[in-house]
Image (cartoon, rainbow, N blue to C red):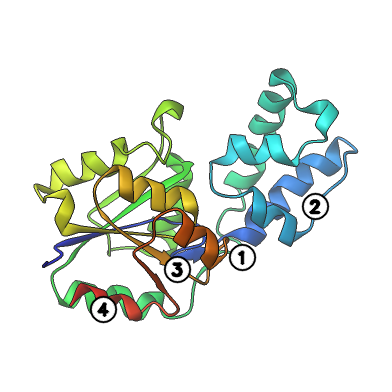
Amino acid sequence: MKYKAIIFDLDGTLINSLYDIADAMNVVLKNLNYPTHSYEKHQSFIGSGIRSLVEKALPLDQQNEQQIETCYKAMVEVYSNNCTTKTKPYQGIIELLDELISRDVKLCVLSNKADEFTKKIVATILPTYFCAVHGLTIEAYKKPHPFGALEISKNLKIKTQEIIYVGDTGIDMQTAKNANMLAVGVSWGYRPKEELIAEGAKHVIQNPLDLIDILS
């Protein structure tokens, strides 16, 4: 199979955004005199979008819709001003993207992060590489729903079987399966290799450039 396009997850796959996300959430929690969380704990919250992260970070007795909505808005405000402060691409990502571009592979991003943040971070940290960048706009279409991946396939006019989906969570592997794309997990992200394999990863790569071997 000759793969013509690659869809990447963003957080935990292309970039390490853990510190900016955790710092912003902890500001919100601290302002309410709620317990804050370590970076390691926040890592387990990431993957299903900011609203989901906010709910998980709140004390159990505060996880009601009104409080979640209030804290979500506060989190968005804090994070919007700090979403590229500590966030960086993982080692080897730039080299991988350069190599893929040289091979004329179409590159896209599909994230459960809010669309405005997804676009802002990609434009700031990884400009010029991607022909499509999509974050979350409709909660019902959040990954692992295949809607976003299928829309990218349709817009590129490339069959789903000719697309690799690369991510760091079980949700990403489920998305790939649901969209009939090749599921490739990365070992450097926010979830363990065992989760990726259990959720359908056909490959789990240890280094970004390992993706070239799969592409070939």
Q: Which residue is disc 1 drawn over?
A: 86
Q: Nearer the viewer, mark 4 or mark 2?
A: 4
Considering only order in the chain, which callout, 3 or 4, is on the residue closer to the N terminus? Answer: 3
Considering only order in the chain, which callout, 4 or 1, is on the residue closer to the N terminus? Answer: 1
Q: Which residue is disc 2 drawn over?
A: 37
Q: Can residue 168 be seen?
A: no
Tell me the kind of residue under disc 3.
Val
Q: Nearer the viewer, residue 125 or 64?
A: 64
Which of the numbered marks, if any, corresponds to residue 155?
Answer: none
Circle 4 SS class: helix
The Cα atoms of the two marked residues, 1 and 4, are separated by: 28 Å
Tell me the kind of residue under disc 4.
Ile
Question: Hey, which quadrant is residue 166 in on the image?
Answer: bottom left
Q: Can residue 193 be seen?
A: yes
Circle 2 SS class: loop
The Cα atoms of the two marked residues, 2 and 3, are separated by: 25 Å
Residue drawn 40% across the image and 55% down it:
9
Q: Nearer the viewer, residue 161 or 27?
A: 161
Q: Which residue is disc 3 drawn over?
A: 186
Q: Position of residue 201 (x, y in %)?
A: 39, 61
Tell me the kind of residue under disc 2.
His
Considering only order in the chain, which callout, 3 or 1, is on the residue closer to the N terminus? Answer: 1
Tell me the kind of residue under disc 1.
Lys
Q: Position of residue 213 (x, y in %)?
A: 25, 80
Residue drawn 74% across the image and 21% down it:
64
Question: Hey, which quadrant is residue 209 in on the image?
Answer: bottom left
Considering only order in the chain, which callout, 2 or 4, is on the residue closer to the N terminus? Answer: 2
Q: In the image, is residue 134 above or below residue 18?
A: above
Q: Which residue is disc 4 drawn over?
A: 212
The Cα atoms of the two marked residues, 1 and 3, are separated by: 21 Å
Q: In the image, is residue 54 above or below residue 24?
A: above
